[in-house]
Amino acid sequence: MNRIITLDEFIIHRQKDFPFASGELTGLLRDIGVAAKIVNREVNKAGLVNILGSAGGDNATGDEVQKLDLYANEKLIECLKNSGECCGVASEEFEDFIPIPAVASKASKYVVVFDPLDGSSNIDVNVSVGTIFGIYRRKSNADGPCTLEDFLQKGSELVAAGYVLYGTSTILVYSTGRGVNGFTLDPSIGEFCLSHRDIQIPNRGNYYSVNQGYYLKFDVEMRRYIDHCSDMNLRLRYIGSMVSDIHRILLQGGIFLYPQTRKYPQGKLRLVYECNPLSFIVEQAGGKAMTCQLQRVLDLEVTHLHQRATIAMGSPDMIDEMKAFVEKYSALPTFN
Ligand code: AHM
Ligand code: MG
């Protein structure tokens, strides 16, 4: 039988691979691992305790906030204070970033961005949700509090990113820029154990993932590409929980699309909290991630915390194919 490797063991073992190998990132990743276990416990209890339903407010981008979102948000922040490595966080649930005071005069060098519970409209119906996170090295002076510029870095400057999927089992997937590894939570020992070593996304897959209900609201090139996916007998899978859809594509291949619609002319998904961290993971696994206007997501300028972006990510050959459709059909005059 293979020896079990826990997340903590793996992080410490990999520490030397990291360019700033001083153990700081190790502490942060462990904090996130602890938060994931706490959130997981609560997500699993969601049907049992009176935590379901709306907290009655809207988040910074106007979506209804579920109670469990707030809980996950709070726990992540609490846990990120533990190691003293994080000088500030920005969360999809808050309008502004939150500076974290230094612990025991430690010079914290990192900021963390996260979507505490993505796909939260799925909670009430017992469908998978996820946490998405990204870690940047701060730009501001380590003597003072963090500043907005620490959070407005391009995705290509991420030093680590990952997600936790609270699904039929709970899995934490992360990358520090040297491949992607996945750890499944073994509830009997309360540890994330290495289950998916060096994940490589297949060059193509049998799935496409898009909210096809918006078909008529998409531009012609996207409609033609979606028609093509259907003509090729690809299977449509759309959970409405991006982490779940991306996780399937990462393991089995496929393409995920969220193009612009009339309601969301810039796309719906958030660049800082959703698109950049997941694009980092997908690229690290050998995939590609670009906007529906064909810019590499990780190269996009970040001008505000809640910026939205269109997105196409997944298997490299399928992204190239999508790109060819966009180039061909967006160049033609449209007769909508
Ligand atoms: P959220 O952060 O408010 O949960 O929204 C993000 C989610 C993604 O997980 C998912 O892919 C998308 O919104 C679904 O949106 P839609 O219902 O418009 O297809
Ligand atoms: Mg989200």
Image: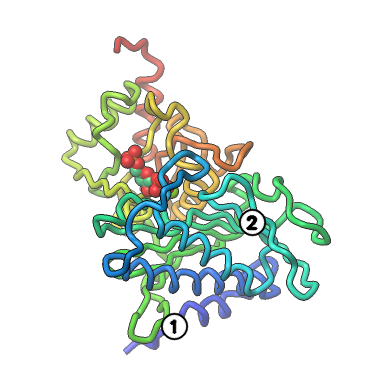
The mark closer to the camera, 2 or 1, is 2
Amino acid type, label 1: Ile
Give me the residue at 62% from left, 44% from top. 154
Which residue is the site of mark 2?
136
Mark 2 and mark 1: Cα distance apart in space: 26 Å
Question: Does the beta carbon of the residue at mark 1 sit less than 8 Å from ligand 1?
Answer: no
Mark 1 closeness class: few <14, some 14–19, many ≥20 residues within 10 Å? some
Residue 316 visible at all: no
Q: Position of residue 249 (x, y in %)?
A: 32, 53
Front-most of residues 19 and 211: 211
Front-most of residues 85 and 275: 85
Give me the residue at 46% from left, 44% from top. 58
Give me the residue at 40% from left, 85% from top. 4
For the N terminus, which image quadrant? bottom left
Which residue is the site of mark 1?
5
User: Element at badge 1?
Assistant: loop
Q: Position of residue 129 (x, y in %)?
A: 35, 57
Q: How is the image coloured?
A: rainbow
